[in-house]
Image (cartoon, coloured by chain):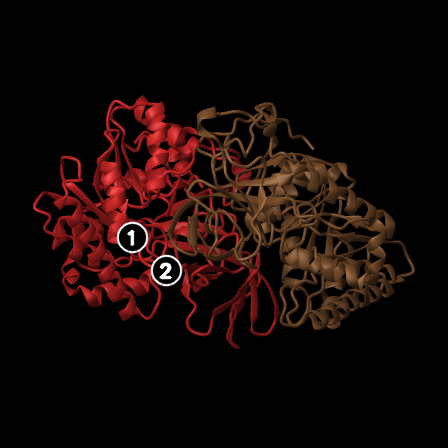
Chain colours: A red, B brown
Amino acid sequence: MQLDDLLRTPIEPTTKGWPAQAGALPPRAVGQQGWNLLRQDLPLPVALLKASALSHNSRWMRRFLEQFDVRLCPHGKTTMAPQLFARQLADGAWGITVATVQQLTVCRRFGVPRVLLANQLIGRQAIRQVIAELEADPGFEFLCVVDSLAGVEALLSELREHPLGRPFEVLLEGGAAGGRTGVRSMADALAVARAVAAAPELALVGVEGFEDVMGGAIQEVESKVEHFLAFLVEIAYACAREHLFAPGPVILSAGGSKYFDQVTRAFRDAELGRPVEIVLRSGCYLTHDSKIYTEAFARLSARTPEIAQLGEGLQPALELWAAVQSTPEPGLAVLTMGKRDVSHDLGLPIPKQWYRPGLHAGPQDLGAGFEVSGLYDQHCCLRVPADDPLRVGDLVSFGISHPCTTFDKWRLLYVVDDHYTVTEAIRTFF
Amino acid sequence: MQLDDLLRTPIEPTTKGWPAQAGALPPRAVGQQGWNLLRQDLPLPVALLKASALSHNSRWMRRFLEQFDVRLCPHGKTTMAPQLFARQLADGAWGITVATVQQLTVCRRFGVPRVLLANQLIGRQAIRQVIAELEADPGFEFLCVVDSLAGVEALLSELREHPLGRPFEVLLEGGAAGGRTGVRSMADALAVARAVAAAPELALVGVEGFEDVMGGAIQEVESKVEHFLAFLVEIAYACAREHLFAPGPVILSAGGSKYFDQVTRAFRDAELGRPVEIVLRSGCYLTHDSKIYTEAFARLSARTPEIAQLGEGLQPALELWAAVQSTPEPGLAVLTMGKRDVSHDLGLPIPKQWYRPGLHAGPQDLGAGFEVSGLYDQHCCLRVPADDPLRVGDLVSFGISHPCTTFDKWRLLYVVDDHYTVTEAIRTFF
């Protein structure tokens, strides 16, 4: 990873979360400023990543991968933060997964050596850009997905006009009925796989899918995930039987951040008669959250009790802090944080702690009776109990549900130590 | 407005919506590239503003303001695009409204001469920054809101430590029970107003509120809005009676983009016995939308039939374009657009037109039977009718509901002419 340019490029005072009075400073200078949240050095709202939780989660996932002998190609779309990608690669990540060509551009700009695009590559612009990247750097490894003859033909049409010196690697995508992308039947799967195998410009290197698109109660979802993973394995068997895969290990890839234990189990049991590389794509493990992934992790721990050997589970690293702006009527506090600052698509933010400058030595737990009752674009309405201590100017922290849709609301987040002193500025590229 | 720096600063190829192969180019060079959406010069998804609709809406609002003799201080939080602020100011806007100090920083960076912060100024950092801006530029006019003694005291404490050569101007905020910020009773209003009037550091220049926080059926909401506006006028009467206002005209301000006709009527009828300046704050009129504001405008037209004299009403200027990525099962198309690209908080995107490169001369209406059934972070599931013509690679356009939460998903939007040729690149600062 080449982060030098990023670390040297000044953060403009117009950036949300930046203390404008500091003027422009490059990220690499931020850790030396001694800025502290509780000393009111940062404007609010602000998004923080706790260094201790990041390190803990990083170690936990490394132990998981070692114990189960699987690879991780974390989904970069979660954070879109090249500094966090670098950390994941240093931790042994196999590559970085992306969802779009813009996300690929960010990875390449900062030197990610292997990128998995977990989607079909659509449109002349997009295909040509990837071919150009592959031509420019023989060390760049790129994989994308195909789920249709139309997708295969679009790739071939561009590859025939702009021939590459090496095969263009694709994974065949399986999907679930009523779900998202991916072939729904073995007949469609084989038709696409045969078209890939027949084209010398392409190499079929594996099978992939995304399992977190099932609806229903949790047991029902787990059972659908099981069936879906079995379908992916069945596709891989069929392709192996027909010798449709290119030489080398066959990649089996799936896994968001909820069912990666099930993915691991299903793929480890696959016997294709040739080497298999299992590639998980979990993107949210690093920051975790305080709701949907916390719940999913509890379920995962129950489903796969052997992970207890890995020590204490994942911890929420991402916190939002806002100030109390108004306490206009009993039972209500209005805070300086809104839809533009925090996830609200899969659960509202969860109030955690509060802090009054000049009164407290550190954050205090809020206790029961506090609940976000509504988010406006720039305001948060917090229902508070009758004996609510909050006053205008107090600081309040929130856990979040779904890291992806909090990260994408910030161009700048801070890593802080356990005393809320800033150690690092993290830039995002959404 | 000083936009030179913005227009000269290159757009990096890592920016979403940018054709990476073009390398970095400054905004002022973009209009000369001849890029065209339908010729596939732009990566998808992409957010477009139709030049003709922007101009139409601009002219419509100018006629409204002239006919009813009111001022407009449009809410900048909608677009956070200094280039659009410049357009609004050139159209005669009284100033730009903001919700946060970061938004104020953006306005100041690009030279907006008058800024109304429609919130209390909270926190030492924030207050000090505004004082510094006021000291640095005697031509800078700034107003913010107070709704509590705590807010007044926080301002005074900083102003006494950092005295300003002129009074710091504030508007007293009225609120509605169960709503957001703002005093709920006349007693609270007068307590805050008296505290402001008693402090030589401060000047009470008016009364404001935000009316679009009422729940219920539309008639009920309109009636609550009416009552709320009457409460604001009553506060202004009481403050005038007690001579709590500073010299000069009294500002009465309210008005999002749904009820600005009611605001206009309520405030025009107010007789305070001294000059009144009515300041609307509508932010969404310029781009309008295809759902909530379209519905609100129909209602406004019925409520205030005299606006028919202003000619054809507001038009939706904001369109999202995405590509069909997969058609994996009958009745479903999956598109390259997700929660990260388009509003989903107050209604899902509305499919409008489609275009097949090589087949069509221009966009074709989709007709009935197309509906967004779900949005993932990076995917859109579109329910399609049985005779659906869509294939992988086709382009589809969407109208949006709630401009604010589409703008904040883009650092770059394009203005296009009626043939979808790019005439301008618009940068945002969220």
Spot the residue most to the right: B273
Quick one: A315 or B265, which is closer to the camera? B265
A423 sits left or right of B27 in the view: left
Badge 2: few (under 14), some or many (20 or more) residues near its Cα, within 10 Å?
Answer: some
Q: Is residue B79 shown above or below B414? A: below
Between marks 2 and 1 in the image, the one whose residue lies nearer the viewer: 2
Q: Which mark is residue A285?
A: 1
Quick one: A354 or B290, which is closer to the camera? B290
- Determine which residue is flagged by label 2: A178
Can see residue A1?
yes
Which secondary structure, mark 2? loop
Q: Amino acid at mark 2?
A: Gly
B26 sits left or right of B235 in the view: left
The percent position of residue A92, horizontal first and vertical second, equals: 20, 41
- Give whichever of discs 2 and 1 has the lower sequence position: 2
Q: Is residue B25 shown above or below A323? A: above
Chain under callout 1? A
C-alpha distance separating marks 2 and 1: 27 Å
Q: Amino acid at mark 1?
A: Tyr
The percent position of residue A65, horizontal first and vertical second, equals: 17, 49
The quadrant where residue B417 appears: top right
